[in-house]
Image (cartoon, helix red, strand yellow):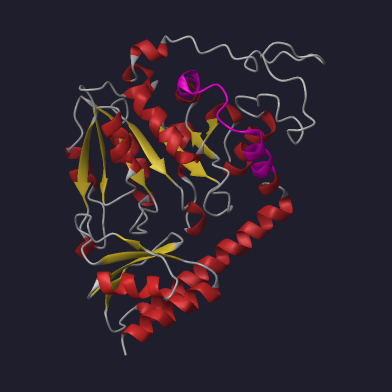
């Protein structure tokens, strides 16, 4: 069953903006887009608009993620896909979306900007942020259009992939299950992208920002069945990816770069476990949760003091203490061994 019946009807019927590049027509002299004819001062080809969906990048990412090109839409990180899904499916003042709390804050912010109710399924730190699928589904009603599931979750690092297929089946024909896999390269599980062909209501978000080290390039992907991809493409800006970002992404997908990425991910996972073991049970550290991401969430006896001590040592971490259920919690990204040793040393000095 197509999920377009749950999308905004006026957007399903929308004729997309007929950009100069969308036609796919080629000619040696291009006078169709009001561009500058000179590229000598722009680094080469920066005077021309890029392809709306760069074919080579789309092909290579589809191969990397094990999907077909029509199942893939490329945009500015995962954030743009989140925003477009909210706009495509949710009517302001009428619909709602369901997500986890704590989790990535842009789901709630995006819903608020769209004028859509965000219903939070509260996760308990005491239970290791375990997901109660029944309680999550109990918040879904006839006006629910999207259910956001970040796995591994940010900031807890908790993995929920074992529950994705069952959730997608339970939501079939009712809501799109949006699985955010920003940190999947650091988890020892297959991507949910393999389930997209079997579930018309499953959308998966991927990014090159984390494992591939391209946070500054802003390249992300939405993976879903072709009807959802086509709908998102219909309402997206005509040229989502700048030419330098496309070039950086293509370079990151060359075999040597992919091999380096795999090595670095493995190194970060080893470092993550080393840091977790070093922190666990230390004075002033009350709990360090297991993580499937490239970060750790820890509860401190005095988070404010710990944050200040690290900052004084030239180390910036994220303080989540103000968020519900995360009192006295800091999130620490895993860096190089030298970075991590500096973190451990700064915390140890504060315990003396």
| Side of 27 where 247 appears, left or right | left
Corner quadrant of residue 66: top right
Q: Residue at x 21, y 43 (%)?
A: 120
Question: Is residue 146 shown to the viewer in this render?
Answer: no
| Side of 186 where 165 appears, left or right | left
Residue 324 vs residue 196, the one in the foreground: 324
Residue 324 belongs to magenta span? no
Q: Residue at x 27, y 74 (%)?
A: 305
Q: Residue at x 60, y 63 (%)?
A: 264
| Side of 322 where 239 appears, left or right | right
Looking at the image, the residue that sits furthest to the right is 28
Residue 245 belongs to magenta span? yes
**Residue 306 in picture, x, y percent from top left:** 31, 74
Q: What quarter of the picture does the N terminus occupy?
A: top left
Q: Bounds of the magenta span?
A: 230-250
Q: What quarter of the picture does the C terminus occupy?
A: bottom left
**Residue 172 in picture, x, y percent from top left:** 32, 29
Image vertical order of residue 278 relative to residue 168, above or below:
below
Residue 197 vs residue 314, the one in the foreground: 314
Image vertical order of residue 296 relative to residue 53, above or below:
below
Looking at the image, the residue that sits furthest to the front is 41
């Amino acid at each position: 069953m197509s999920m377009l019946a749950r999308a905004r009807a006026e957007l399903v019927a929308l004729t997309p903006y007929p950009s100069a590049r969308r036609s796919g027509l080629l000619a040696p002299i291009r006078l169709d887009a009001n561009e500058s004819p000179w590229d000598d001062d722009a680094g080469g080809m920066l005077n021309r608009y890029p392809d709306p969906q760069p074919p080579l990048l789309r092909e290579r990412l589809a191969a990397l993620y094990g999907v077909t090109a029509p199942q893939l839409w490329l945009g500015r990180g995962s954030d743009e896909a989140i925003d477009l899904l909210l706009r495509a499916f949710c009517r302001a003042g009428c619909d709602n979306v369901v997500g986890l709390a704590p989790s990535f804050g842009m789901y709630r912010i995006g819903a608020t900007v769209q004028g859509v109710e965000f219903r939070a399924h509260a996760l308990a730190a005491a239970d290791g942020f375990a997901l109660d699928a029944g309680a999550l589904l109990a918040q879904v009603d006839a006006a629910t259009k999207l259910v956001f599931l970040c796995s591994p979750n940010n900031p807890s690092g908790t993995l929920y992939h074992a529950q994705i297929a069952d959730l997608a089946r339970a939501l079939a024909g009712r809501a799109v299950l949006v699985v955010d896999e920003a940190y999947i390269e650091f988890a020892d599980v297959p991507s949910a992208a393999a389930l997209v062909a079997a579930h018309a209501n499953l959308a998966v978000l991927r990014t090159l920002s984390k494992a591939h080290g391209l946070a500054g390039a802003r390249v992300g992907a939405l993976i879903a069945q072709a009807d959802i991809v086509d709908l998102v493409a219909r309402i997206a800006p005509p040229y989502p990816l700048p030419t330098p970002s496309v070039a950086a992404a293509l370079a990151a997908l060359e075999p040597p770069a992919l091999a380096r990425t795999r090595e670095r991910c493995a190194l970060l996972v080893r470092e993550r476990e080393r840091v977790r073991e070093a922190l666990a049970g230390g004075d002033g550290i009350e709990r360090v949760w297991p993580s499937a991401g490239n970060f750790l969430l820890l509860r401190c006896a005095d988070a404010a003091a710990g944050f200040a001590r690290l900052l004084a040592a030239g180390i910036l971490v994220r303080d989540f203490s103000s968020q519900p259920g995360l009192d006295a919690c800091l999130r620490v990204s895993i860096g190089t061994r030298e970075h991590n040793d500096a973190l451990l040393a700064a915390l140890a000095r504060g315990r003396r």
